[in-house]
């Protein structure tokens, strides 16, 4: 049972290797691609293992800036290219940015399963 973690001042991302779930918490307001690189590398590492399903749990991600949205979008596109991975995104109706922005990910990956609760 392994868990990898990336922590910043305002955020935490945990990757549960067993369930192939990445849980994002807090606020992602980093200043551009170089600061997002460790997160993007973790996402790529997970996708490169080509598991049947990857779950992104964003229910506790209260804020993400445009650079963070861009990083998530690039990840979704990389999953689309692999064609063998089911991407499940869990979000919250209580967090305003998620309703609009997460629906845009479905446009990038039509097979993406989005669950807003």
Image (spheres, helix red, strand yellow):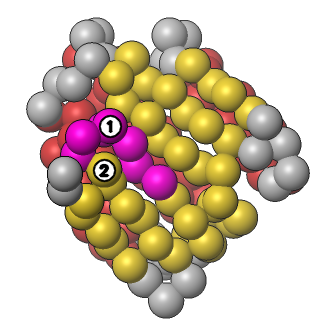
Magenta region, residue range: 17-23
Q: Is residue 58 left or right of residue 100?
A: left
Q: Which residue is mark 2?
A: 16
What residue appears at the point 22 percent right and 25 percent down from the top-left corner? 51
**Is residue 11 shown to the viewer in this render?**
yes
On residue 105, which mark appears? none
Which x, y percent locates residue 68?
Answer: 52, 59
Sort mark 2 into few (<14), some (14-19) or many (20+) by Cα contacts within 10 Å: some
User: Does residue 30 sit above or below 78 in this rendering?
Assistant: below
What residue appears at the point 18 percent right and 25 percent down from the top-left corner? 50
Q: Foreground: 45 or 100? A: 45
Q: Are marks 2 and 1 in contact (CB under 8 Å)?
A: yes
Look at the numbered disc 2 and give the secondary structure of its residue.
strand
What residue appears at the point 81 percent right and 54 percent down from the top-left corner? 95
Q: Foreground: 62 or 81? A: 62
Q: Which residue is mark 1?
A: 19
């Amino acid at each position: 049972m392994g868990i990898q973690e990336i922590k910043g001042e305002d955020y935490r991302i945990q990757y549960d290797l067993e369930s192939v779930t990445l849980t994002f918490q807090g606020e992602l307001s980093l200043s551009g691609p170089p600061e997002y690189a460790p997160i993007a590398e973790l996402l790529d590492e997970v996708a490169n293992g080509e598991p049947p399903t990857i779950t992104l749990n964003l229910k506790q991600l209260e804020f993400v800036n445009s650079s963070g949205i861009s990083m998530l979008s690039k990840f979704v596109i990389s999953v689309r290219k692999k064609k063998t991975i089911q991407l499940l995104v869990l979000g919250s109706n209580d967090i305003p940015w998620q309703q609009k922005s997460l629906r845009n990910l479905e446009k990038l990956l039509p097979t993406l399963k989005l669950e807003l609760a």
